[in-house]
Amino acid sequence: MTDAIRAEGLVKQFKGKRALDGVDLTARTGAVLGVLGPNGSGKTTMVRILATLLRPDGGHAEVGGYDVVRQPHEVRRLIGLTGQYAAVDADLTGTQNVILIARLLGFNRAQARVRAAELLERFELTDAADRPAKTYSGGMRRRLDLAASLVGRPALLYLDEPTTGLDPHSRNGLWDVVRGLVDDGVTVLLTTQYLEEADQLADDLMVLDHGRMISRGTPEELKDQAGNQVLEVRTVDTGQLSLAARIIEAVTSTPVVSDGLLASVPVTSSGVLPEVVRRLDEQGVAVAELSLRKPSLDEVFLALTGHTADEEKTTDETVDEGARA
Amino acid sequence: MSAVTTRTRPAEPGGTPATPARITPLGTIQNGLQLAWRSVLKIKANPEEVFGLMLQPVMFVTLFVFVFGQAMMGDWQAYRDFLMPGIIAQSVIFATLGTGFSLSQDVEKGIFDRFRSLPIARSAPLTGAILGDLVRYTITVVMVLLVGILIGFRPEGGAGGVVVAAALVLLFAFALCWMSAFVGMIVRTPMAVQAFGMILMFPLTFSSSAFVNPEDMPSWLQVVAANNPVTHVVDAMRALMLGTGDATGPVLWTVVWSAIFTAVFFPLAVWAYRRRT
């Protein structure tokens, strides 16, 4: 099996700040590569380089065997791009938006009309086809954006945070669409801030932080690294929380994070639960709440990097802006 | 890597034409026209914008003619005839601001990213927007002229003179819109483009022969007006539309100024466009 995307040592700087700091990447043909990372981790910058929208300052990237810097036209013939901001023309109707792209790609009038009807039908936009896109809901706009990126039947589809800001129903709908595309043999590069999304869709995962790849593997491998679940304990008397934290630490041999009200720790199996309960009981800790839940992206980050994803948001957002400017 | 390329166009009903392996000059023109079609659709989608486009000149024509006319020339009809070429020029010059505004919006909203990720001519989004805007400018010229005719403006230069004058001001607008495009690309937000443009356009149009005969201005302002390209455009239009005096000099100056603006701002706009997008 060949690789659809292969990149080595990608570097991109904005005003002296490194948005990408030597990233390697491989995406297998026909698979979904998920890129997980918080705001400002360099996800969008990476997608923009691979979509020929930005030139890397260092490194090398090939898409479908074509160099993104030297053969951009060839790369553009292979890819479809759905950005973080739904890039449809709000003044144009759904049909007009799709026809415009089709015409640009060399469809004649009749073919363009057929293709537009086909795609709008597929994305359940037929009823809204003749309404301006500005009247669409967020989910509908996202679907129209995706439809527009599929006009030329791309072999590779880049989805840059496709579900950010969508309600759960629209998000699930979009996931189904992506699965359908993968069944058709499309290679997908998906960036996301949501662990669950990566888990649902990606065959392979890479985690970006501060422009560096800090982890890669299958979703399963990643979760093993970061803990499958999170154990949380709240005590009746907050004064007992630090004692509870020490007990849990002793059982799980993992550092416990406590905010003064709640102690939490990633755990790899729920097998530790009875032991924790027994010891807390033995030490006379009155437990108000004890639960196991899936880890959030923050916690995965904490486990992988030692800092939370949120922490650096303010400084990194300027980098993301730079990536768009 | 053939595995990827052969997958590009799976055989499906409906048929997908292969995108050309390279961009031909014909393809560049086609892409530009397709994107101009988009700009025209946007005009149609926003009738209120066209209405606004009309409203401002209507307001200017009526206010200037009836408020200032008597005071300026002792006769509002005489001022109306003097003013019409000036106000057409001013309306079109202000309309060029829209070019920078909409380009800036397209960049901000990520629409240019979509276009640039397609295998199409790189210049097409820029040329398409500007071609579409020429339609907008033409609408403006026609609208202002209609309002003028409604209040009794009967150009002595006849239809021929009016058409040549309109063509001349459209040429100048075409040259000027590269400046607007350049500003649209270097200023960060559409609102800033608007503000910046206003600061530029008001002095440019008012310190010309558009509204007042420069002979009535203080001497330092006369120097400004005499060298203001808008003065040449307006003088040329006046000579052509009103059939007064020889248009040759100002027409030539207008062409020269249009060439200068294009020579300076076309490369700058393209440079800024490539840098920003």
Image (cartoon, coloured by chain):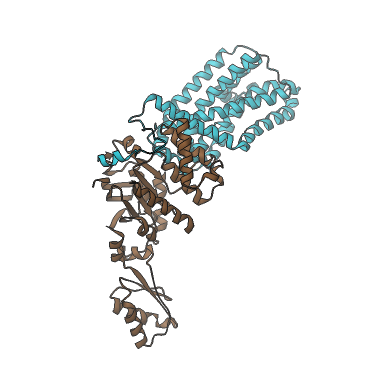
Chain colours: A brown, B cyan
Position of the N terminus of chain B, as image quadrant, is top left
Residue A260 horizontal side relative to residue B240, left or right: left
Q: State the residue at coordinates (41%, 29%).
A: B267
Residue B150 horizontal side relative to residue B173, left or right: right
On screen, A179 above or below A236?
above
Q: Nearer the viewer, residue B90 or B58?
A: B58
Q: Is residue B252 visible?
A: yes
Q: Is residue B211 visible?
A: no
Q: State the residue at coordinates (51%, 51%).
A: A138
Q: Nearer the viewer, residue B138 or A80?
A: A80
Q: Position of residue A180 (x, y in %)?
A: 39, 50
Q: Position of residue B93 (x, y in %)?
A: 57, 29
On screen, A186 above or below A246?
above
Res. B81 image quadrant: top right
Res. B265 image quadrant: top left
Q: Nearer the viewer, residue A170 or A20?
A: A170
Q: Position of residue A229 (x, y in %)?
A: 35, 69
Residue A113 horizontal side relative to residue A276, left or right: right
User: How many numbered tags mark residues here?
Assistant: 0
Q: State the residue at coordinates (40%, 61%).
A: A310
Q: Position of residue B203 (x, y in %)?
A: 58, 31
On screen, B199 above or below A125?
above
Position of the C terminus of chain B, as image quadrant, is top left
Outermost residue toward the front?
B13
